Image (cartoon, rainbow, N blue to C red):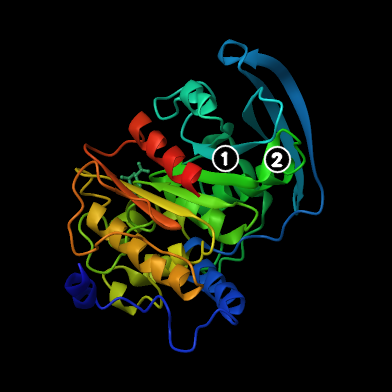
Amino acid sequence: MLAEIKRRNLPETIPNGLTKENWAAYKKEMIALFEKEEYGVTPEKPGCVRWEVEKQHDTVGGKAVHNLVKLTFETPMGDFTFPFDTVIPNTGKPVPMFVYISFHPYGAGQYLPIEEIIDSGYALAIVNYNDVTKDTNDNFESGIAKMYPRRNDGTDWGKIGMWAFAASRMMDYIQTLPAVDREKIYVAGHSRLGKTAIWCGVQDERFAGVISNDSGCSGAAVTRGKKGEHVVHITKNFPYWFCKNYQKYIENEDSMPFDQHQLLALVAPRPLCVGSASEDEWADPESERMGAYLAGEAYEMLGLKGLSGDIEIPAEPGDKQFGGKVGYQLRKGTHFLSRYDWQRYIEFFNQQ
Ligand code: GCU
């Protein structure tokens, strides 16, 4: 893999002169770069965030409490409200939590084995991303998108940024819950929402860790030299996920002043777990593993262990490398967030 990394001519994870001392300033600069060139500029944290808990009842056979929360915050165009759900085990002591950015409304869809996660001792906060803004090319007219005027200068935020921003507003609420361990709140997502989880965790340090499942292009996979999807495809099919500037790099990826491993690196020093599926060629498992491995160099610079294991050995389905603060796991099969994946992520965070 090292020869392959060299061949791809990727930007250095640790540019000359980067040290522990100037890491925070570097991180700030890099976030500004990713805002300007890829995901768009995130608005300021709203001044006023409030919520109502609409329903409260026992779930999972009495092992947990389910709440429907309606969260409201100020925007330049007035108040915006979106719903999300929490499921918190009745253990009587603060528990870790996954903030899961979901493709589906609570209780629907096939990616979230709620009972198993609760039984593992984790709470969940679940937002249906379409309740934040629709995953369609709607001219930024649905949900939160219409609440923020656009400058049309190439840097306006795309929907990945909006979904990530909503997860941070959920965090505003979760921070107030005595039943949740504030030091152990992790953000998780699959595919386009894995990209979102990374971008959210990078910007919001209240998240103690990040799970990226099969996030591929513009997520955990390094872009230069990857297989499957590239900037040309993703910006053609989903231009509204990104800022307009990202389109400058169509068929011109070598000129990007960044690559995705540098984004993953910004999760440091907090734990990061990247998962791939062996037959997910569009996302490209090898490039996802490369992203995780190279991000590990930032952890090492900070005196922590990055991605453990021998990077020269190709990962086989079922392999996991969980020895450090960066984890990587490869599931056999196609693009999906499976029960098996969740078991691996829980195993990884239990070890931290
Ligand atoms: C498409 C897209 C990917 C994305 C995926 C998903 O395949 O090209 O970038 O990750 O959808 O979100 O399922």
Report which residue position mark 1 lands on. Answer: 99
Q: Which mark is residue 62?
A: none
Q: Is mark 2 within 8 Å of ligand 1?
A: no
Indicate the position of residue 352 as horizontal and vertical percent values. Answer: 50, 50
Residue kind at label 1, given as amino acid type: Val
Q: Residue at x 53, y 38 (%)?
A: 100
Indicate the position of residue 262 as horizontal and vertical percent values. Answer: 42, 70
Q: Secondary structure at mark 2?
A: helix
Indicate the position of residue 247 as horizontal and vertical percent values. Answer: 38, 66
Report which residue position mark 2 lands on. Answer: 174
Above or below 67: residue 265: below
Q: Is residue 241 visible?
A: yes
Above or below 225: residue 49: above
Q: Nearer the viewer, residue 316 or 86?
A: 316
Direction bottom: furthest residue = 17
Indicate the position of residue 351 as horizontal and vertical percent values. Answer: 47, 46
Q: Could you tell me how far apart the alpha carbons at marks 1 and 2 are, in whole angstroms?
A: 9 Å
Hey, which quadrant is residue 148 in on the image?
A: bottom right
Q: Residue at x 49, y 68 (%)?
A: 34
Residue kind at label 2, given as amino acid type: Ile
First along the sequence among labels 1 and 2: 1
